[in-house]
Image: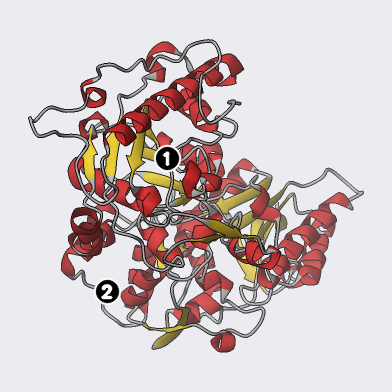
Amino acid sequence: MKRGYTGLVASHGQLARRLLSALEGQNSDRAVRLATSCAQLVASQDSGELEALVYLADRSDPDADQVRRELQDALDWGARHLVVISSAEAVAPHHHHPGLIAEDHPRASAGGHPIADRWLALEAAAREVLVQQVVGERAPLTLLRPAPMPVVGGEDYWSRLFSDRFAATVAGFDPTLQLLSPTDLATALIEVLGGRLAGLYHVAPRQPIPLHKALRRSRVRRLPVMVNLAFPPATRRAYLTYSWTVCSRRLEEETAWRARSTSAEVLDAFAVHRGRPAATVHGAAEREFERHGFDGYGLDRGYIARLGRTLLGFVHDRYWRVEIAGMERIPQQGRALLVGVHRGFMPFDGVMALHSVARFRGRYPRFLIHPALSKFPFLANFMSKLGGVLACQENADHVLEGEGLLGVYPEGIRGAFTPYKRAYKLGRFGRDEFVKTALRHQAPIVPFVTVGSAEIFPILGAIRWRWLRRLTEWPYFPITPTLNLVPLPSKWHTWFLEPIHVEADHPPEAADDPEVVRRLSMEVRQRMEAAIAEMLERRKAIFWGSIFTTADGRQPRAVRGEGLNLKASSGTLNSTTGSLR
């Protein structure tokens, strides 16, 4: 009886040989044969029975017509399982990309970039072959989307990028990359073939790495450019600008597969294969990265610490002279929601909150940010390194599931664009998603308010130009006294209020009860409004003075908890801002 085997169809490139070697080393029970086509696999009479076909698409030039022919030939020869190795590049880079997306996320199949569209066309062609199968039992089709796998001698873009002496990058952006070991892909293949799994699976490394760190680790010099001349149309510019990271959770949940190598380790092995020594760690920031690993969304603790000693420390202590009360109410460990009021047009209040919490509590809150903050050079880099994550439910869940601090501004972007005459009146809280998130994850809510941030860029008017609105994704272009260039040195006062322990009184299922959600949202809102009212009452000047201490050393009754009725009633909230949803 002829022994069955798995056929690996690929061009005879370095990656195909590395993958074949890894498969043979990991799986001695199943014979694996490499060929350039299915016809070549079955040409020999003693080749045995083709049990499964693995098609490794060309990393530089995915061909939908070729995958269609190869899969059809495999079915004609009786293959009982088809596997197509696509690429994570099928996920188009974009500033709306939430990061670490799953297979069922809309952006995972949206396309919108020439390279991503070619990979999606390849996957669509593979599905068409299966749909059109009319003879025999339908074979399962597995689509794998591995992260890039740089190999020495490889002809694909990523292998060449980390082999060259210089690399053109996009100035002002430092996207997070995922680089996968061929060995990790081989182990994923073994799990897929053994379980005869069908469907789409992302395959990602254990940890990602920022682009500039990856190039430095490979001893490749960056050449940041601001123009498109170095990036002709339909090339890699977008992949060096915006996020396109993927999550392997589905594969990990359905199999025993776990990635063994990090992106940094892949680059170290790449350097060794090139005959170069692995990168050495220099400086406190690099050691901090090595100790904590690389964050999937770009958070850079060393960057935060460095700015905390310089720019952030200066504006916090000297320029805005931020006065803080209630910092001890932020839990030292475990999950929590920090719910704030966003004013001042630019996201400086969130940055100051991050700096304060990192400095005085040793924790790094992850604030949900508007996509516009990830669209523009330098600002995108700044926000990602400070830990900002795109505002979406998946990212909120990710932060809280990791026992982190999640920072949210429930008024959304319109809160930041509130005209100065209404600066300290709360707007609508949207659909109260922050309450539902807190209930689902059983996380306490810590409201906090800042008085003074609205004066750094007081909005006096608006320019409503449709073209500018499309470009910036802002509600309008604000008119401020300093023309949005220099923030005014107002005196800030930030107050972290008593936590609302929703987990103590409500189960996770309460997130589906509109009455509970509404009541908790009203309670949060009422506490914040009461705190703002008292802070404004005590504030005697915009640019100087303290409101948390007095000449006789006494604290205001709000800090002591006296004189305020912060219990939300079940009836209508008497608010100067109108009705609540």
Which residue is label 1 attached to?
341
Q: Is residue 86 visible?
A: no
Residue 143 vs residue 432, the one in the foreground: 432
Q: Percent position (x, y) of residue 425?
A: 47, 36
Q: Percent position (x, y) of residue 93?
A: 59, 64
Say left or right for 447 vs 6.
left
Of label 1 and label 2, which has the lower sequence position? 2
Label 1 packing within 10 angstroms: few (<14), some (14-19), many (20+): many
Residue at image point 89% right, 53% down: 132
Q: Percent position (x, y) of residue 496?
A: 29, 33
Residue 304 vs residue 285, the one in the foreground: 304
Marks 1 and 2, how far apart at CA: 47 Å
Q: Is residue 516 above or below residue 364?
A: above
Q: Quadrant of residue 300?
A: bottom left
Label 2 packing within 10 angstroms: few (<14), some (14-19), many (20+): some
Identity of the amino acid at label 2?
Ala
Residue at image point 83% right, 61% down: 72
Number of numbered discs visible in the structure rendering: 2
Residue at image point 51% right, 47% down: 418
What is the secondary structure assignment of the residue under circle 1? loop
Residue at image point 40% right, 38% down: 340
Q: Percent position (x, y) of residue 30?
A: 57, 53
Q: Is residue 98 above or below residue 34?
A: above
What is the secondary structure assignment of the residue under circle 2? loop
Which residue is label 2 attached to?
278
Q: Is residue 279 visible?
A: yes
- Which quadrant of the figure contains the C terminus? top right
Colour scheme of the picture: secondary structure
Identity of the amino acid at label 1?
Val
